Every structure is written in C-alpha cells, then in structure tokens.
Image (cartoon, rainbow, N blue to C red):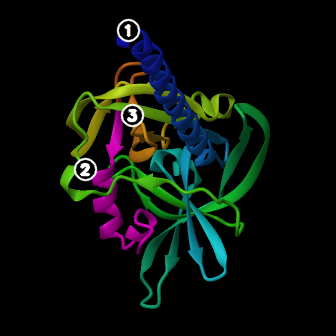
Amino acid sequence: MKSLFLLPLLLFTASLVWGEAAKSRKATAQFLQDISVTIKAQGGYSRSEGSGVLITRKMGDESVTFVWTCAHVVDNLRQVRSVVNEKGASVKVVEFNDAQIVKELVESGRRVGEIKMDAKVIKYSDFEHGQDLALLMVRAKDYGKSTARFHLNKEDQIIPIGTRLFHVGSLLGQMGANSMTTGIISQVGRVEDKVEFDQTTVTAFPGSSGGGVYLEDGTYVGMIARGAGEGFNLMVPIRRMTTWAKDNNIMWDLDSKL
C-alpha cells in the first residue's frame, strides 16, 4: 500500500524540482539579455559590429556604465597622429572615435525596442600584439542598471573541461543581437600569438566577438575572441582578463567590492 502513496509523492516532488529549475533558467536567460549589447564601430569607410557586456558601478549619486569587449571590435575607431611635445620631439598620439552601444529591450522573450548610446574607449590592448581587450565607458549617466558577475575565485579560475556554458552575443551583428547558445569548455590553455585562450564549443559567429561566456548560473568566465563557428571557438579566460585589469589599475571593473 505504501508504494501507492509513494508514486504521487515522487511525481509531485519531481514537478517542484523541475519547476524551480525552469524558473532559474528563465531568470538566468533574462539576466544575460539585460547585460548584453551590440557594439557598432564606424571608422571612415570601415564598419564593424560586435558584442559587449555591461558593468555598472556607482560613482557618487550617479551610476556609470562600462562595457567589456574585444579590441578588434573597436580597432577601426583608432586614429594615430603625430604631435610635437614640449621638448620639440615628434611623438605619436593614439585617439579613438566613439563607439555606438545598442541595447536591445527584451520582455518575456520578445523584443520591444532598443536604446542607442555613445561610448568612449578608455582602455585598449592591441589585438595583434596585445591582449585583444578593450574597456568602454557609456557617456550617458544612469544608463545601465544590470551588471555582469565575474568568476573571481582564485582557487578555481580554470574552468574544468566538460563544464556546461552559455554564450550571449550579437551573432552576425545586430541582426542576431542577444542570441543565446550553449556548449562546453572543450580545452584549457590554448596558446596563439603568445597569448592564452580557452577553447569552447558554444556556437559563435562573426559579431560574437566581445560577447560573454557564462556558467549556467550566469557567472561570467570569459569573452569570445576567435573561432571557426559552431564547434571550435576561443575565449579570453577570466584569469587573463584579471591579470590585464590588475596591470592597468582597473580591477574595480571586475570586482564590485573595490
């Protein structure tokens, strides 16, 4: 007789667990939509579209929003000119035009509009001879409310092979803005051009560069930078981003406690 009562109880418990898991996945998906943007860079006759991730920090009474992305997404905004310094020597000055940040507004899975804002490049590491990382600052104050959560635990910054991941980015540009794909960590520590990447199977295409890669709970663990499409893509691991942030005194942009 006990088994007759046990089966409904098991079904009820399984239903509760499934319902909570579904609710958690929905909340994570919405969170990743909220922090993901398209980046448009127009430089002369050159135009590119990539992805970025929002970070919001409180500065006094205002909220200031920053965007992590790949350097090659905004490279065509870079201009180099020569000036004469106070000693009479000619030196090169690197300047950037503003990028345009496009935030898709999504409610209950439906696109309901978009917001466009200008952003200036405040940190940049060349993609050919550097780290291929860039940090932008949105010029409008109180623009973003959501902020990415970064995986900063020193003891386990290397994500084990086989770990399930999400990627959200602008696959093929704004046409594919906020596309969400899944995959795993397929290898750790790939070295290309003397810099380290982790390999992942999350689906990514041109336009995904700069987009975040996340654990299933929405924690940011890397940035898509290079790849070959569906099954072989390389991401900048959070441990390399952390090193670059420390070297450039911008660790506050990863760690909200600083």
Give coordinates of residue 185: x percent, y percent: 29, 31
Which amino acid does the dot numbered 1 rest on?
Answer: Met
Q: Is residue 57 left or right of residue 3?
A: right
Query: Going from the N terminus, do you reach mark 2 or mark 3 first?
Result: 2
Give coordinates of residue 45: x percent, y percent: 67, 42
Of residues 170 and 18, the one drawn nearer to the viewer in this rendering: 18
Which amino acid does the dot numbered 3 rest on?
Answer: Arg
Q: Which mark is residue 157?
A: 2
Q: Which mark is residue 1?
A: 1
Marks 3 and 1: in contact by CB < 8 Å? no
SS at circle 1: loop
Q: Is residue 193 left or right of residue 209?
A: left
Mark 1 vs mark 3, foreground winner is: 1
Q: Which residue is mark 3?
A: 226
Residue projecting furthest to the right: 112
Give coordinates of residue 35: x percent, y percent: 58, 49
Vertical position of residue 258 compared to residue 222: above or below: below
Query: Going from the N terminus, do you reach mark 1 or mark 3 first?
Result: 1
Q: Is residue 71 left or right of residue 106?
A: left
Mark 2 vs mark 1, foreground winner is: 1
Q: Which residues are magenta?
A: 234-258
Of residues 70 and 16, the one drawn nearer to the viewer in this rendering: 16
Q: Is residue 107 magenta?
A: no
Q: Is residue 204 in view?
A: no
Give coordinates of residue 200: x percent, y percent: 33, 29
Vertical position of residue 214 compared to residue 137: above or below: above
Residue in the picture at 42% in, 40% down: 214
Q: Is residue 190 left or right of residue 129?
A: left
Question: Residues under labels 1 and 3: Cα distance?
Answer: 60 Å
